[in-house]
Image: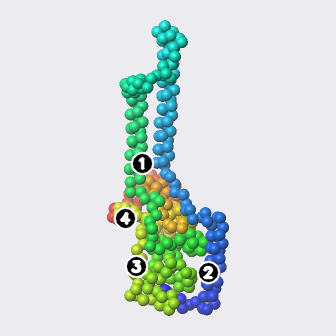
Amino acid sequence: SQMSVFTNLSDQDVKDILGYVKAEWKKVETAKASPAGAAAGGGAAADSGPSNVMLLGLIGVIVVAFLVILILNKVIGTLERLLLQKQGILPEDAEDTETNKPAVDRLATVKILAKNKKFVFFVVLCSVIGLGSWTWVTLWNTNVHQGYQPVQPIKYSHQLHAGAMKIDCQYCHSGAYKSKHANIPSLNVCMNCHKVVKTESPEIQKIYNALGYDKETQKYDSTKSKPIQWVRIHNLPDFAYFNHSQHVKVGGIRCQTCHGQIQEMQEVYQYSPLTMKWCIQCHKRTEVNYKGNAYYDRMTDVHDRIKRGEKVTAASLGGIECGKCHY
């Protein structure tokens, strides 16, 4: 698609735009040269989640239980030896047989441990806990692609555009405000800037090649154009419904809430787990701004009816809305 024509821009407007681009580009070069700018490409750290905490807790319990059993066995052995010495069965000057035990007796020790019900129970308990924890973590992370970072056909830097240049996310992803999908911007959106910003870059050249654009003649050849095969990063199951505009426009949720510090990412990766639990936790802690919203006036009316003891049906709470049953 060809670049949009802005006939309303005067020559002075164009000069102002070019001056702004040059000034911002100097800021980018300065940011790259500074240590803070070099460290900004690391991206936001993903939350390890409650599963790792639970696993570490179980490991800690196992270690503590093992130490307690060792101490108790040592105490019990000492008490038994003192009792045998008191009864005259074992001489008081008897040496500790454990320290001078021949290597041949090690196998006998293993057999004794195998017959020890407490030891066997502890080993079985640790095995069950370990296997159960591994199974839980494995099942929990099934089809969870947190951290997924595929190689894209064009190395687009959000750190440069959204971070250093401070381009609003919705300039490129305009669908996030008015549509279910945030959409991938078409190349004519890229050309709104890169027809003027002619920085020599192999990645920008890929845009020109995909459009069949000749930067020397500034003309398009539709016979040479070809689509760019972007690799999708964020995928939800078919049965899950998510609407960007509902969250961005109505809820006022920032992009970083789900996508992390996108303005610091050199290459985009999946920041959040996008699991049902993760969504529910966000819905539970996010307060609803009901002031000035006519939709919640009905909810307030329902609460008043409950206080008066009147009947409140499912229909009063939106139970007959089409979307409640039909996707």
Query: Looking at this rendering, what residue extends furthest in the top direction?
Result: 88
Measured in 3D between alpha carbons, the distance from the residue under mark 4 to the one under mark 3, in whole angstroms, is 35 Å
Q: Position of residue 101 (x, y in %)?
A: 46, 22
Q: Marks 1 and 3, Cα distance to the nearest angstrom? A: 40 Å
Which residue is disc 3 drawn over? Answer: 227
Residue toward you, 240 or 60:
60
Label located before the other in sequence (1 or 3): 1
Q: Looking at the picture, does residue 179 appear above or below residue 90?
A: below
Secondary structure beneath label 4:
helix
Residues at circles 2 and 1 in contact by the CB criterion of under 8 Å: no
Position in image of residue 135 (x %, y %): 38, 46
Give the amino acid type for the residue marked by disc 3 in the picture: Pro
Between marks 4 and 1, how big is the CA–CA gap?
34 Å
Determine which residue is flagged by label 1. Answer: 137
Q: Which of 79 and 274 lies nearest the eye of the viewer?
A: 79
- Inspect the image, locate mark 4, and give the three-letter code of the amino acid beneath it: Gly
Residue with the mark numbered 4:
323
The amino acid pointed to by label 1 is: Val
